[in-house]
Image (cartoon, grey):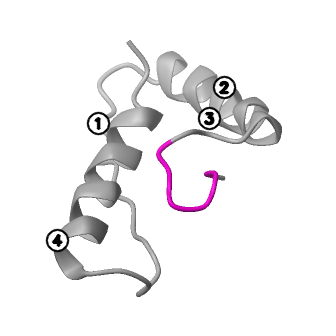
């Protein structure tokens, strides 16, 4: 879904994200919690920051 080590969404993943968004917009009153994870490369602080940035990148305005 993401470019390795980045919060940039791969172009091939955007279609799935938009499909999910479309379904959720039709379901009024539905809430969604977005979380993300990283692998264990790098230090914990960097990975936590990247996880949060990835979750934010998925949010639709």
Q: Residue at position x 32%, y 45% from top?
A: 53
Left/right placement of residue 21 relative to residue 48 reads right
Q: Which residue is mark 2?
A: 18
- Helix, strand or loop at label 4? It is helix
Q: Check if mark 3's residue and mark 2's residue have beta carbons within 8 Å.
A: yes
The first of marks 4 and 3 along the sequence is 3
Give the spatial CA distance, label 1 vs label 4.
28 Å
Give the spatial CA distance, label 1 vs label 3.
13 Å
The first of marks 1 and 4 along the sequence is 1
Q: Which residue is mark 4?
A: 45
The C terminus is located in which quarter? Answer: top left
Q: Which residue is mark 3?
A: 20
**Residue 16 screen position, x and y as percent:** 73, 38
**Residue 29 screen position, x and y as percent:** 29, 24
Q: Residue at position x 70%, y 29% from top?
A: 19
Q: Is residue 38 above or below residue 35?
A: below
In this view, the mark in front (4 or 3):
4
Residues rendered magenta in the picture: 2-7
Dot 3: within a 10 Å radius of its alpha carbon, few (fewer than 14), some, or many (20 or more) residues? few
- Helix, strand or loop at label 3? It is helix
Q: Is residue 3 magenta?
A: yes
Give the spatial CA distance, label 3 vs label 2.
5 Å
Give the spatial CA distance, label 4 vs label 2.
30 Å
In this view, the mark in front (4 or 2):
4
Q: Which residue is mark 1?
A: 31
- Helix, strand or loop at label 2? It is helix
Q: Residue furthest front?
A: 42
Locate residue 8: give its quadrant. Answer: top right
């Amino acid at each position: 879904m993401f470019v390795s080590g980045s919060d940039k969404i791969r172009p091939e993943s955007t279609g799935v994200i938009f499909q999910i968004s479309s379904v959720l917009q039709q379901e009024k009153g539905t809430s969604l919690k977005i979380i993300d994870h990283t692998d264990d490369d790098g230090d914990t602080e960097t990975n936590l920051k990247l996880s949060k940035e990835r979750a934010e990148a998925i949010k639709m305005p």
